[in-house]
Amino acid sequence: MTSQPARMHAVTDETRQIVDLVLDYSRERLLAEDVPLDKPLLPAELSRLAGRTVSEEGIGARKALGVFEHVLAPACITTDDPRYLSFIPSAPSKAAAAFDLVVSASALYGGSWLEGAGAVHAENEVLRWLAAEFGLPGGAGGVFVQGGTLGNLSALVAARETARERGIRPDRWRVVCSAEAHSSIASAARVMDVEIVLVAPDAGGVLHGDAVRAALHEHGDSVFAVVATAGSTNFGIVDDLASIAEVTRAAGVWLHVDGAYGLAAMLSPVARPFFAGVEHADSLIVDPHKWLFAPFDACALIYRDPELGRRAHTQHAEYLDTLTETSDWSPSDFAAHLTRRARGLPLWFSLATYGAAVYRDAITASIELASRIAEEIDSRDELELVRRPQLGVVVFERRGWDRAEYARWSQRLLDDQYAFVTPSSHAGRTNARFAILNPRTSFADLVGVLDTMR
């Protein structure tokens, strides 16, 4: 007889039923063509509908899955809906989403070469491909981490450690970035207890080398890194990477490129010229769960010289000696983590399945759609573009509306299950914003949203 503790792991009739239930649900969800947008519920309402699910006895797989399917999942907004246009959407390919099940089912550990050589090999193939696309040298490499915040933090830790190894010991460490850099840069600075020097971009939101040079001149050796943005989250604007790289190379300062959202656009021939200079980066990030159509959560962190990342992040402990005393490529050595899922595998499977050309076409289509809807906005008297889109983000205003009117409009769109478009703001002014990423988003979808603003 199977003991109660072993029951969770034994292959029994009950186990087969559980697996069948989960796989049937997953198959239905993956193959569905019209999944509701859905919306959040208040805590009290969720508690009432879900009831108590965690107890000593358990409620059984069928009931638990029923609670998820009919109560919990509908209280989550569907991020791969073509009319999910807020923040930065997620639109994983069917191959990537399906293979995510395989990663969990295979009991893989992605932290070391010793335990996960096959998985690490596949992830590294993708990282090398990305590095080559971005113009980095053949020895470049890194690791897939949870998201852009951890990727930026890990890169900046490596940058500071490299400066320390050069014998630099300022009273206060500093990192320079644009005033429009992602909030994760300020978060990393707080975690590291370093000062952040915000540099004003030009009127179009672009940071240039001259402004960076002035900041370096003012703060000297205390600056251990400059962060340039390759596609800002709010506007999708790419900094002048070439002129910034020229300045950082002359000064001997680490250049990190935050391309979490936008750097994937470099795969498109339409956008590739915007990113000239990224090949000089000492480190960079790009999030596959954004414009590379992978499921949450994955950020590719790539170092020009991976050994600098290894020296900054390798953890040492007696039980890890068998890993750290070898030259094996262990992903845990390249970021602020140890235990890790092989989160790069869904992207690897999708790329291997469809080919890179499909990715290039999908990204190009998003950029062209953004340009087309911007022209439509320009043609409407009641609307005004805030900035001409460079990539796939379109920011615009409804003339005469205050913040409360934007909020009511946004809530009405979600209540009607038509679209998810949250208000945004810039320079103290409330606006609306389309983040166009999903290949299923159509011009008609976007025009329909604009029509609700009349």
Image (cartoon, rainbow, N blue to C red):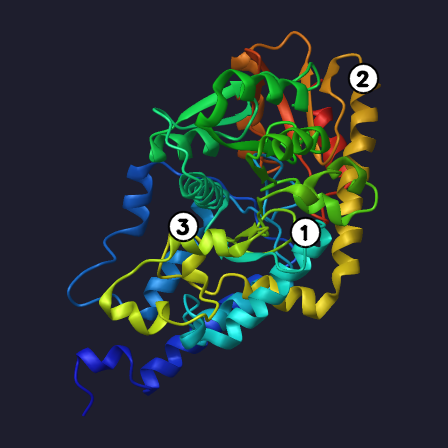
Quote the CA–CA distance across marks 3 and 1: 20 Å
| Res 432 → quadrant | top right
Disc with the residue nearer the chain's start (1 vs 2): 1
On the image, the x and y values in percent for residue 26 come to 51, 66
Q: Is residue 9 above or below residue 27?
A: below
Q: Position of residue 50 (x, y in %)?
A: 31, 51
Q: Quadrant of residue 434?
A: top right
Image quadrant occupied by the N terminus: bottom left
Residue 47 found in image quarter: top left
Is 65 on the left-hand or right-hand side of 207? left
The amino acid beneath tag 2 is Arg
Mark number, residue 57: none
Q: Is residue 71 at all visible to an observer of this figure? A: no
The residue furthest front is 167
Task: Give the answer, above or below, for where 190 lies relative to 211.
Answer: below
Q: In the rendered structure, which disc, 3 or 1, sits on the residue that comes first in sequence?
A: 1
**Sequence order check, earlier mark of 3 and 2:** 3
Mark 3 and mark 2 residues within 8 Å of each other at the beta carbon: no
Q: Among all residues in the image, which is located at the extreme top?
A: 400
Q: Depth-wise, is mark 3 or mark 2 nearer the camera?
A: 3
Along the line of sight, which residue is nearer the eye, 373 or 73?
373
**Front-most of 312 and 150?**
312
Residue under label 1? 136
Could you tell me residue 246's position as x and y percent? Answer: 69, 32
Q: Where 58 falls versus 299 (above or below)?
A: below
Residue that mark 2 sits on: 380
The alpha-carbon separation of the residues under discs 1 and 2 comes to 44 Å
Q: Please name the amino acid that badge 3 sits on.
A: Ala
Any part of residue 136 in sight: yes
Could you tell me which residue is drawn at 57 percent across and 62 percent down?
97
Q: Quadrant of the C terminus?
A: top right
Which residue is tagged 3?
A: 312
